[in-house]
Image (tube, rainbow, N blue to C red):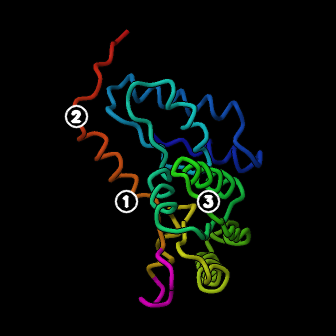
Amino acid sequence: MVDESLIQDTIRAGELRKITMRRVVQLIASAVDAGADAVLVTCSSIGPAVTLAKQLFDIPVLRIDEAMAEVAVRQALTIGVLATLRTTLDPTTALLRSKAADAGRTVELVECLCEDAFPAVMSGDTETHDRILRKALLEDLKDVEVIVLAQASMARVVATLPKDALRAPVLSSPELAVLQARQLLLKGPLPERTRV
């Protein structure tokens, strides 16, 4: 299911609004009603709605960035977080803090918000977007132990860097999220769902 109005509303409002959270929960409910065995929500900006939805459904409901955050707090104490939108940076850092607390670890987060990159890519100027992110990766986050990409779309920029350009490993959410979903689905039989 694709509904870009969810992220557009969040960007416009500068925060995840309650009405948007309700819409996310409704979409998850539609997926459950259609027979989904798990739901993966692929936008970090609306991640807090997923946290709420987890309590409402008997199937796994996953945030795209959840597995990435768990790996990051296990691997490092100093974590760089790269984002182009405040509405993505804030939920990602909150998730990292939560996962660190769950793991009994104290982490230092180095936030790197590249606000000029998002309007550039939205206007079709991918060159400027990529240049801004490359600078952030190579200069602003050079002293962290691991880098977390708050937006999965930034992974292609990392792929353009020379192999040894970054000292820290870079984590992106899509692959880790799919592996997490696979593991949850293969663990054993899922609870029977009652159809109404």
Identify residue for label 3. 106
Q: Position of residue 29 (x, y in %)?
A: 47, 25
Which residue lies most toward the right here? 13
Q: Is residue 30 magenta?
A: no
Crowd tier of the residue under label 3, counting other residues whose Cα lies within 10 Å: few below 14, some 14–19, many 20 or above: few
Q: Residue at x 48, y 86 (%)?
A: 161
Which residue lies most toward the top here? 196
- As helix, strand or loop, the secondary structure at mark 3 comes to loop
Give the magenta part as a residue range.
Answer: 160-169
The answer for how far apart the CA atoms under marks 3 and 1 are is 26 Å
Main SS category, magenta section: loop
Amino acid type for the residue under numbered disc 3: Thr
* Left or right of 174 on screen, residue 80: right
Identify residue for label 1. 175
**CB of mark 1 within 8 Å of CB of mark 2?**
no
Q: Is residue 164 magenta?
A: yes
Q: Position of residue 191 (x, y in %)?
A: 29, 23
Q: Earlier in the sequence, mark 3 or mark 1?
A: 3
Q: Earlier in the sequence, mark 1 or mark 2?
A: 1
**CB of mark 3 within 8 Å of CB of mark 2?**
no
Crowd tier of the residue under label 1, counting other residues whose Cα lies within 10 Å: few below 14, some 14–19, many 20 or above: some
Vertical placement of 169 versus 17: above or below? below
Q: Residue at x 66, y 48 (%)?
A: 8
Which residue lies most toward the front here? 104
Q: Quadrant of the C terminus?
A: top left
Identify residue for label 2. 188
